[in-house]
Image: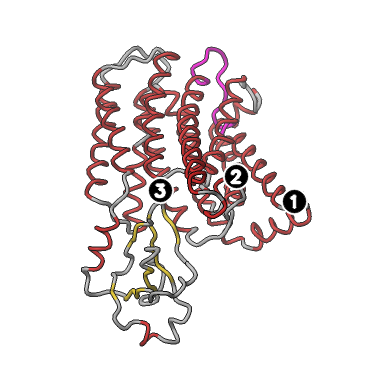
């Protein structure tokens, strides 16, 4: 299951939480660069190692483990880890932890139930990944799995009313073309394949996994907009649902076989490595991802594709022909182009040209900025959920704020104002 990112959690003490004045500019800049490089390394290693380890464990000779049990074990370990981290946050006070969990999970049961749908989809996605990687070479899966960028973008447009730049639409078309070329190479018989592998089933599984990944991510963002739960609480809640739903899937798909042979049938050190990587790798990425911007994430994805391809050549005898190289190159280029930030000037200029819509007032010079009520989505801030004519723009911060005295002095507040249409997105600088 994909771990919840750390964007929704409260800032924790650590290198990334130091204030600007706590360090000299040169030292702060160097520390920031180190954190970005560490984030890059973690993202690349986790993305590539999980796929390679699953492929290795599923193609080993001997008894094959049940994929559904691996999914359940990963959810159990992830949930226990988050529980221990919450216990540490409460300074080892069991009473405080129990009261906190009772309030967050049971009393606020509506927020908890909201996570059932994405948890169900993530559990399905994890099982589909095992099917896909068992039937496709690791490099082919890694390239094809980037279709999740396309599905996420489409669901964002449909469900969140996001707008994409022309460059992003072009990069999505380039991405689809690259994946199609790679799949054409796979269908034409790119290298020998074991008899027990079905490329058609692998392709169907990876496409279904990409669709579920895109929908779950956007749905999760939509239902939890404005939520104040920490990253560990959200992952604990997802783990609870994931474990229960994973057990249901295990009983439905392989219940008889598991009852006969045992839950841990076929488990080897390689299988345990997969389970631990799936459980802890996602949580580790959730911690470091807040230090990585979109360009770094795209670069990490590109590097992981290259790393998976090189490792597949050495470990599995994967053959790279010109058709695969062309398709993979198009996908890598598309990922990089899609991750490029949109220009702030273009967004603000197009917004200022509109003569209708709710009003956005500039903050008078010399006045301190009011409290921010913005919700962040990647490198953009959206405020379409605020009432009309109740938001203003701070020129110094280029973000949207709700003025505390708006309702009391509306006539004075909107003199000499600028108007922006509903749902305008302003890039964060």
Residue that appears at 24% across and 58% down: 346
Quadrant for residue 172, please give it: top left
Q: Earlier in the sequence, mark 1 or mark 3?
A: 1
110 vs 131: above or below: below
Label 3 element class: helix
Q: Is residue 415 magenta?
A: no
Q: Which mark is residue 215?
A: 3
Image coordinates for residue 184, horizontal then vertical, percent: 25, 25
* Percent of width and height locating residue 101: 69, 55
Mark sitting earlier along the chain (2/1): 1
Say which residue appears at 64% left-offset and 45% top-offset.
Answer: 82
Vertical comparison of 106 with 62: above or below: below
In the depicted structure, whether residue 406 falls above or below residue 118: below
Characterize the local packing of mark 2: few (<14), some (14-19) or many (20 or more) Cα atoms within 10 angstroms.
Answer: many
Give the distance between the C-alpha atoms of the residues marked 1 and 3, in whole angstroms: 37 Å
Hey, which quadrant is residue 203 in on the image? top left
Q: Which residues are magenta?
A: 57-71
- In the picture of the structure, the residue carrying the numbered disc 1 is 91
Q: Residues within 10 Å of mark 1 (few under 14, many from 20)?
A: few
The residue pinned by badge 2 equals: 239
Q: Is residue 104 left or right of residue 214?
A: right
* Secondary structure at numbered mark 1: loop
Residue at left offset 48%, top offset 78%? 404
Q: Count the marks: how many?
A: 3
Q: Earlier in the sequence, mark 2 or mark 3?
A: 3
Choose between 406 and 49: the one closer to the eye: 406
CA distance for labels 2 and 1: 22 Å
Task: Mark 2 and mark 1 in contact? Answer it, CB < 8 Å.
Answer: no
Question: Does the stretch in magenta take in 59?
Answer: yes
Name the spot of residue 231 as percent of width and height, x first. Answer: 57, 50
Secondary element under disc 2, as helix, strand or loop, is: helix
In-image side of 288 versus 396 (left or right): right
């Amino acid at each position: 299951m994909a771990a919840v990112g750390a964007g929704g959690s409260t800032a924790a003490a650590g290198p990334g939480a130091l204030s600007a004045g706590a360090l000299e500019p040169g030292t702060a800049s160097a520390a920031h660069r180190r954190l970005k490089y560490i984030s890059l390394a973690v993202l690349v290693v986790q993305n590539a190692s999980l796929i390679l380890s699953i492929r290795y464990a599923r193609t080993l000779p001997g008894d094959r483990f049940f994929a559904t049990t691996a999914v359940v074990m990963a959810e159990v370990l992830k949930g226990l880890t988050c529980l221990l981290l919450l216990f540490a946050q409460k300074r080892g006070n069991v009473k405080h932890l129990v009261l906190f969990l009772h309030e967050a999970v049971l009393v606020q049961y509506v927020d908890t139930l909201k996570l059932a749908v994405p948890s169900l989809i993530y559990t399905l996605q994890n099982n589909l990944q095992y099917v896909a990687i068992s039937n496709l070479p690791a490099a082919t899966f890694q390239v094809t799995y980037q279709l999740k960028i396309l599905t996420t973008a489409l669901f964002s447009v449909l469900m969140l009313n996001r707008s994409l730049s022309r460059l992003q639409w072009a990069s999505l078309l380039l991405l689809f073309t690259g994946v199609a070329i790679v799949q054409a190479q796979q269908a034409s018989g790119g290298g020998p394949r074991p008899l027990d592998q079905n490329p058609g089933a692998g392709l169907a599984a990876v496409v279904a996994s990409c669709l579920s990944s895109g929908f779950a991510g956007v749905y999760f963002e939509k239902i939890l907009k404005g939520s104040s739960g920490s990253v560990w609480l959200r992952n604990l809640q997802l783990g609870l649902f994931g474990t229960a739903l994973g057990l249901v899937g295990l009983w439905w798909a392989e219940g008889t076989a598991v009852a006969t042979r045992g839950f841990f049938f076929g488990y080897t050190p390689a299988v345990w490595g997969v389970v631990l990587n799936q459980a802890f790798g996602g949580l580790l990425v959730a911690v470091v991802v807040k230090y990585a911007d979109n360009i770094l994430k795209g670069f990490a994805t590109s590097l992981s594709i290259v790393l998976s391809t090189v490792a597949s050549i050495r470990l599995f005898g994967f053959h790279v022909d010109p058709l695969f190289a062309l398709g993979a190159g198009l996908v890598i280029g598309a990922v990089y182009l899609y991750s490029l930030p949109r220009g702030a000037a273009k967004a603000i200029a197009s917004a200022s040209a509109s003569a209708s819509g709710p009003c956005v007032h500039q903050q008078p010079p010399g006045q301190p900025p009011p409290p921010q009520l913005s919700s962040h989505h990647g490198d953009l801030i959206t405020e379409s959920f605020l009432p009309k004519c109740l938001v203003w723009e701070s020129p110094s911060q280029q973000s949207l704020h709700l003025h505390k005295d708006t309702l009391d002095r509306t006539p004075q507040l909107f003199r000499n104002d600028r108007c922006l249409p509903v749902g305008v997105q302003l890039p964060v600088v």
